[in-house]
Image (cartoon, grey):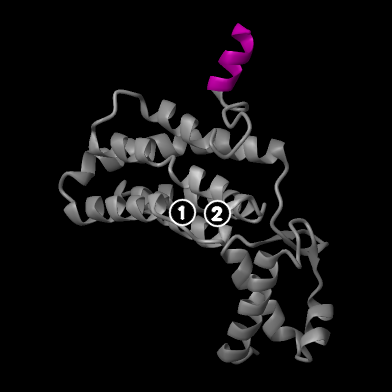
Amino acid sequence: MRAPTTIVNFVHDKLRDEIISGRYAPGMRLNESKIAREMDISRIPVREALVRLREQGLVMKHDRRGMFVTELTTKQMQQINSVRIVLEAEALRLCRARIKSNKKRADKLKSLLQKMEEWDGDSGVDAAEIDIEFHRTIWATAGNPYLVDTLDSLCTPLFVHSALQHVSAETTKWRLNHHHALLDVVLGTSEKTAEEVVIAHLKAYYIEPEKYSSIGETTAQSD
């Protein structure tokens, strides 16, 4: 039995707002029964809302423990990014090969870049939505749905984790301004390799994103 869509939407929006506001901090457990009691509703719409939040990356499920607000350790982020470097660099190259025949996608990327560079909001989650749309447009243009699905499942928790850290608006804007180099690769105007650009981009957000990649291993051995 499914709950009415309107109730699920209400619960989803309320929980999303409370996660963004910090009432439910990263790593906090979202107790289905407790939330249902607080809202004076059954557990079914809460469960469905939590599933939707999980699909959006705001919530993570831990086996036998339940749902928690997304939180990643530094090591987990580095391990995810070590894979992301390889896949996103490939997506950039494939996008570059196809973008010349897809002016609509090229215009969309330029428009999203302009939105990020002009961003003047307060919500890190809203900024993350523009950010991930830019990346997803690159992935989609690459033309491999399996690549898109893999990158999406890997990266969504990363975007959400960064958005929920409640960094200053100045830091968020600074991070959003680190996308021009990615577009330069796509448009064929960059002298750097796709891997170099992806790593430089990730360093605006994460500590040693290349640590668990072969690039990081090579660097460590040469130290």
Q: Position of residue 29 (x, y in %)?
A: 80, 64
Task: Tell me the number on the disc at residue 132.
Answer: 1
Q: What quarter of the picture does the C terminus occupy? A: top right
- Please check the rendered image and state whether residue 150 is part of the magenta-colored stretch, yes or no: no
- Please check the rendered image and state whether residue 218 is part of the magenta-colored stretch, yes or no: yes
Q: Residue at x 64, y 40 (%)?
A: 77
Q: What residue range appears in magenta? A: 215-223
Q: Amino acid at mark 2?
A: Thr
Q: Residue at x 53, y 36 (%)?
A: 204
Label 1 to label 2: alpha-carbon separation: 8 Å
Q: Quadrant of residue 15?
A: bottom right
Q: Is residue 222 above or below residue 99?
A: above
Q: Residue at x 51, y 56 (%)?
A: 128
Residue corresponding to mark 2: 156
The residue nearer to you, when weighing 175 against 46, is 175
Q: Is residue 7 above or below residue 168?
A: below
Name the element at disc 2: helix
The answer to whether mark 1 and mark 2 are in CB contact below 8 A is yes
Give the residue furthest to the left.
Answer: 101
Q: Amino acid at mark 1?
A: Ile
Name the element at disc 1: helix
